[in-house]
Image (cartoon, grey):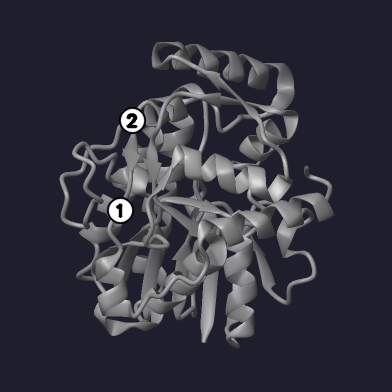
Amino acid sequence: MKALITGATGFIGSHLAGALIREDFDVICLVRNPANPRFLEGINVGIIKGDCTDRGSLADAVKGVDYVFHLAGLTKACSEADFFNANVKGTENIVQAVLENNSHIKRFVYLSSLAAAGPSHDGIPLKEDCKLEPVSLYGKTKLQGENIVLANKKNIPVTVIRPPAVYGPRDRDLLIFFKMVKSGIIPYWGKCYYSFLYVEDLINGIILSALNRDAEGEIFFMSDGNIYSTDDIIEAISDALQKRPMRLNIPKFVMPLLGFISEKAKDAGKGVSIINTDKIKEMRHSHWICDTTRAAERLKFEPKVKIKEGVKWTADWYRIHQWL
C-alpha cells in the first residue's frame, strides 16, 4: 500500500508518517524544502518536493498512490489571504490533482478541525450533522476545504476528520501554555470546556478511517471522549511540571488586545504565536466540545490516552528535547 502525506514535516504529519511505516505502508511525503525534513529525519519515507499551493508540483506526487492524507494547512496566521491560500486553495489544488492523475485512489483523507464546525452554544457536544458556525478565519477556511473535498465525493472516495485540540510530543501550539505554567503565572479568562485528543490516538483514528469502507463519504469528530474544564487542563500541566502557577484573571474584553500584542511580536520576527487575533475569536467562546460516538460505532475508534497521562508524556518530551 502506498500513501502520500501532505504536511508531513509538521507535528501531526510526522507522527502519521511514522505510524504508516510501522503498518508496512510505502510512504511518500510532499515537502516544500527537502533539505529541511524536520521531524521526518530518520524515518524511512520517500520525499518529493512540492507545495499544495503550487498545483503544478502535485501531479507526480499523487500518481500511483493508494491513499492521500491531506494534512497540510495553516493553523495560525495573521493574514486572511495566507489562510485562504493554504487551507482553501491548497486543498482545491490537491483534490484537482487527484481527479486528473489518480483514478484508482482508495481513499482521500482530509484533516479538518472542530474549528470548522465552531463552538457549542448550549454546552452539548457537537455531532457531525450540527449547524456549522465557525468563528475564526482558520475555522472558516477549514470548512471551505471540507466543502471542496465533499463536493467531489462522487468521484473520489473521501473522508473528513474534525479533531479538537490535539497535543503531544512535537506540538508547538500548546507549548506556550506549558511555558506559562513553568513561569509561575498563567492567564485565566474564566472556566471554559474543551475536548482534547492525544496525537497517537488521532493517528490511529486517521488510519482506521482510511481503511474502513464505512468511512467513505463521511465526517467524523474524534476526541478522547472526555470534556475538560480550564481548571482540569491547568491542573494536568501543573502536575506534570510540579508547579503551581498563580492565575492572572483576564477580562474577556481585554483578550483581543493580547492577540494584537502577540501579532506585533510576530512582526518583530518572533513568529506567529497561538495567541493571536484570529485564535482569540475562538478563545472567547466557552465550549469547544464534540461527540465522538459516530467514530466509536462505525470505526471502532477507541482512544487510549486521557489528559493527565498525555500531558505528562508531552511535558517529558519537551524537557528531553529542551523545549521547556
Q: Position of residue 34 (x, y in %)?
A: 73, 58
**Could you say whether the residue bearing mark 2 is in a helix, strand or loop?**
loop
User: Is 22 on the left or on the right of 164, as rendered?
Assistant: right
Q: Residue at x 73, y 35 (%)?
A: 182
Count residues near mark 1 (Cα–Cα under 10 Å), then give few for <14, some for 14-19, many for 20+.
many
Q: Position of residue 126 (x, y in %)?
A: 23, 51
- Report whether residue 320 is seen: yes
User: Is 227 on the left or on the right of 147, as rendered?
Assistant: right
Q: Amino acid at mark 2?
A: His
Residue under pointer 1: 290
Q: Position of residue 299 (x, y in %)?
A: 32, 78
Q: Amino acid at mark 1?
A: Cys
Number of numbered discs on residues: 2
Q: Residue at x 30, y 58 (%)?
A: 149
Q: Is residue 289 above or below residue 244?
A: below
User: Is 105 on the left or on the right of 131, as rendered?
Assistant: right
User: Is 16 on the left or on the right of 181, as rendered?
Assistant: left
Residue under pointer 2: 285
Return the residue nearer the eye: 121 or 271: 121
Q: Which mark is residue 178?
A: none
Q: Is residue 18 above or below residue 323?
A: below
Q: Residue at x 47, y 58 (%)?
A: 197
Return the residue nearer the eye: 186 or 262: 186
